[in-house]
Amino acid sequence: MKSFFLQDLRRSIINPGFFAGIVFVLAILLPAAVLDTPLNGSRSYLFGFGNVFHASGFSPFAAVFPVLAYAAVFCEEHNSGYLRMILHRTGFAGFMRVRAVTVACSGGLMIAAPIAAVCLIVYMGGAPGIPADSDEGLLAGTKIIEAIIKYGDWYVVGGKMVLGFLFGALWALVGFAFAVWIPNRYVSLLAPFILYDTLWLFIGNRFFNPVYLLAGDDVGHGDYPLAVLTDLLYIGMVIPVIYAGIKQERRT
C-alpha cells in the first residue's frame, strides 16, 4: 500500500495538467503582484495582497484549476478498465484513502505554490507591520489587523498559503466526486466550476461563500481560523460523496 501511495502521489504531481495549472495561476496573479503593486517598500504588503486576491480577477475562476492535475484521471481508469485492476490490488478502502489524499495534494499544491511565490514577492517588496500613511484604514477594524498586532505578519502570509492549499484540495476533491459519479472527463473538469459559481451567486454575502475562502479576508472580517474550519467542513462533506460513488463502482 505504501508503494501505491508514493506512486499515486508522484503521478498526481508530475503530470502536464499540474504544471499547466501552476503556469496559468501564476499568469493571473503575477501581474497584479509585480505590475500593479509598488515593490519598493512604499506601500503596505497588505495593499499588494489586495491586488493579488481581489483585483486580479482570479477568485471567480479559481475552481477551474485544481481539477486539472489529477481529479479527472479516475475517468480514464474507469473507461479503460484499469480501475478494476487497481481495486483488486489495493482494495476498496485502500484505494479510497490513497486517491482522496493524492487528489487533494495535487489540487492543494497547484494553488498553494503560486500563491506562496506571489505572497513572498509582495511581502518582501512591501512595508511590514500595521499599514500606515497612504494605507491607513486598509482593513481597519478587521481581525487581520488584530492578528498582526498579536501574532505578527506571518499570520497573514502563512494564512494565505494554508487557505490556498485547502481551497485547491477542496475543489480537486469536488472534481474527483463528479468523476466518480459521472466518469466523463469533461464533466469532472467543468462541473466544479459551474457548482462554484452557482454557490457564489446563491449563497451571497455569507462567510461560507466558497469564493471568500480563497483569500479569507471576507470570512468573519478576516477570521482565518474560521475560513480554515469552513474549508475542512466542506471537505468533510465531499469525502462521503466520493466514498459512496466508489462503493457503487465496486458493486457494478
Image (spheres, rainbow, N blue to C red):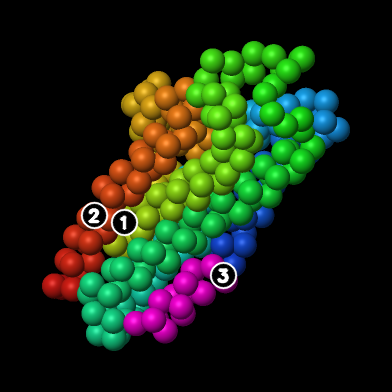
Q: Which span of residues is magenta-colored?
A: 1-14
N-terminal-most mark, 3 or 1: 3
Residue 15's mark? 3
The residue sitting at 59% across, 27% down in the picture is 149
Q: Is residue 18 visible?
A: yes
The residue sitting at 62% across, 62% down in the picture is 19
Viewer-proximal residue, 184 or 5?
A: 5
Assess whether mark 1 and mark 2 are in contact (beta carbons under 8 angstroms). Answer: yes
> Please, what is the three-letter code of the amino acid marked with disc 3?
Asn
Q: Give the answer, above or below, for where 166 lies relative to 50.
A: below
Q: Using the numbered discs, state the Cα–Cα distance from disc 2 to disc 3 in whole angstroms.
A: 26 Å
Residue receiving disc 1: 177
Classify mark 3: residues with Cα within 10 Å, few (<14), some (14-19) or many (20+). Answer: some
State the SS at label 2. Answer: helix
Residue receiving disc 2: 241
The percent position of residue 65, horizontal first and vertical second, equals 52, 51
Q: Quadrant of the N terminus?
A: bottom left
Task: Name the magenta segment's main secondary structure.
Answer: helix
The percent position of residue 56, horizontal first and vertical second, equals 65, 33
> Please, what is the three-letter code of the amino acid marked with disc 2?
Val
The percent position of residue 247, horizontal first and vertical second, equals 18, 67
Viewer-proximal residue, 5 or 68?
A: 5
The percent position of residue 44, horizontal first and vertical second, equals 73, 27
